[in-house]
Image (tube, coloured by chain):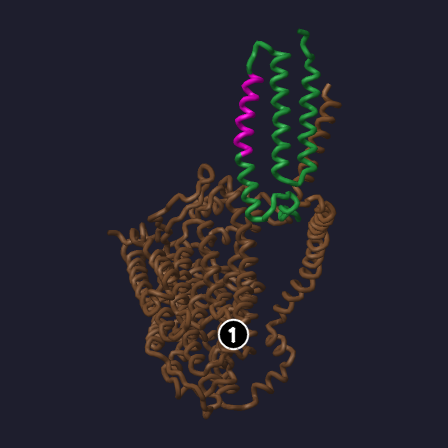
Chain colours: A green, B brown
Amino acid sequence: MSQIPLSHVLFLSTGLFFIGLYGFFTRRNMITMLMSVELILNSVNINFVAFNKWLYPQQMQGLFFSLFIITIAAAETAVAIAIIINLYRSHQSVDIEDADEMKY
Amino acid sequence: MRYEQYIFLIPLLPLLAFALLGLWGKSFFRQYAGIFSTLLMAVVTVLSLYAAFNYFLVNGKAGGVYQSLIPFNYNWLNFSQGMSINMGILLDPISVMMLVVVSIVSLMVNIFSLDYMKGEERFGVYFAFLSLFSFSMFGLVLSTNIFQIYIFWELVGISSYLLIGFYFEKPSAVAAAKKAFIVTRFADLGFLIGILIVAFYGGSLDFNTLLARLGNASSPQSLSITTASFMGLSALTWSLVLVFAGGAGKSAMFPLHIWLPDAMEGPTPVSALIHAATMVVAGVFLVARLFPLYLFNGASQQVVVVIGTLSSLLAAMIACTQTDIKRILAYSTMSQIGYMMLALGVSGYVGEAGLGYSASLFHLFTHAFFKSLLFLCAGSIIHFVHSNEMKDMGGLAKMMPLTHLCFLVACLSIAGLPPFSGFFSKEEILAAAFAKHKFVYAVALFTAGLTAFYMFRLYFSVFWKNKNRLYAHRADTGPMMKVAMVSLAILTLVSGFVPFTQFVTADGKPFTSHGDLAFSIGPVAIAIFGLFIAARLYYTDNNRAEKWSQSWRFLYRTALHKFYIDEIYLFITRKIIFNGVGRPAAWIDKHLVDGFMNQLAAQTEHFSVRIKGLQSGKLQSYALYFFAGLAGLTLILLYFWK
């Protein structure tokens, strides 16, 4: 089986990254924004794994790093959901446009 | 235990009183502040008298010469080998004599104030300040080195400032306190520069070392300080004249005397203590302390004579025209200190040639008593009349017999009539002046006549003129006031009989001065003449005084306006310094320095107003900026990172 080249995988991860970025910039719902952030993180994970596999197959750092990021992402999601719930309680909304008290 | 070992208690007990009264004078010590301070001062007086007894009569002499003892000297700041600032105690005839004077006058003023300041809101604070002053003055006279004396010099200055401004709700008192502070500080600048020059060339700050090094023409230090010159005068002359300027500021010598009359805004007992007997003679003490150097450097001694003579004459002339009772006394203080200075200026060193030195300090000694007595009597009168102006007084002899008697004793003493104490000291000063310089003698003699005239002008105007005047509010002289006045009157009577040249001489060797009866005729005659004129003009209610002042209009008006010296100072400060220096400096500060800063702030604000729209509070736009920045940086890195 001929191996798919590294660049294909990188295209996938870049695609995922910009989809996530686009979602983060355009969605007003905070839950959706959180999901976009997850997409960005996952694109990074794919990069790590891909580089590990293609460039340094004897080593394991990339794999471990992506596992580490998955853990961090889980914790981060928990915190973010807590913030969103609190924000919902005080603003009766999860729309990011409604939380703009910090402007000048 | 030898007496030198507890000398340190003399300054420290008043310091203790100051600390306790300063901390708790308004609460815990409120009732007993005066008693407490007075009792401590009584202890100090006993210690001082005991020290004086031991020093002068028991064991101060070695081989017929009074020794300068240093029982205690603590090395406080060490700069280099042989150059340090010490805190110590120096006992020699003048410091022991000053201990006696300061402690007795302090005690009397404390006693007097018990009644005089009774009911005062800040009674405890007043006594705290008095104690601070006593501490500083004791420290000043006991100083072992010129820097220590400078420290205490400033401390007496600050206590004087605090006490002049004691009634700080009166604007005039505040102005007077500021004036005294600024004028003496200006003078002290000279003093400090003088100290630095002396210390630089002498390589020491210690009095005895300095006198030994600089007063000896063959020592290397003396050679270097006399050969170094600036603007045609040697460094020694400069330093001594500058030190004298400091002394002249404190002692209210012309032309730095302008603060003293205004200082009378303070409570009257304060004037008696600080501005008559003790602080204002610090200048005389300083010159006496460095006397061998002034003698060694003739030019600086000339300055002392000229300033002393001029001050005594000018002040006496001004005193003849003033109408405020305390101001007259202030000018008479200035005139008498002028006497002391001129006596130091005409004095020699060895044996009887040093008569002027002894006479000066003798006059300091007697003057302290009779002048503080005069001030206390004035306080008693002001207490009774509730006014400082002579025109509000008159015919008080019957109403205040004791004050009248004390005032008369002090007047006779200051006028120099025998057998009162002023006679003896003034006599010696005149004799010293006569021996050295006939012109100075003539001026001093004329001043003696003026002194008798203006003192008795005051005496007759206050106690005899307008015999039938009635007084609305009558406050009786309290018992403590009487005690203080009578004690000082007794001291005024007896202090002239102290054989002063047996104790205090320039070279430390006692000698016997013998009054010459024929010589005394002149001064006594001119004093009686002055007294007689005063009696003719002011004993009864008449208009002879006005006629005289009309016929001598120019001189009268000039003296009445204090020779326009205040106006000259105002002209110099307002017109020249304020307009010429202050205004441009203020303009630069306001327009250039402040302007630059203001512009900086305004531009920053302007800029921030423009960019504040970026702070939208929208998370996503922030994220966009963040991403754009990141992308930009990445591009830059990619482009430049070869």
Q: Is residue B215 magenta?
A: no
Number of marks in picture: 1
| Residue A61 visible within the image | yes
Q: Is residue A72 magenta?
A: yes
Q: Which residue of the protein is positioned furthest toward the bottom in this rendering?
A: B468
Q: Name the residue under label 1.
A: B327
- Residue B501: give x, y in percent of width and height: 38, 61
Q: Which of B250 and A71 is in front in this view?
A: A71
Q: Which of B350 and B189 is in front in this view?
A: B189
| Amino acid at dot 1 | Arg
In the visual, does B313 lie left or right of B290? right
Q: Which chain carries label 1?
A: B
Binning the other alpha carbons within 10 Å of mark 1 as few (below 14), some (14 to 19) or many (20 upward) gives many
In the visual, does B515 lie left or right of B391? left
The residue stretch that appears in magenta: A61-77
- Tell me the residue at 62%/46% (across/down): A99
Quadrant of the image occupied by residue B32: bottom left
- Residue B569: give x, y in percent of width and height: 63, 65
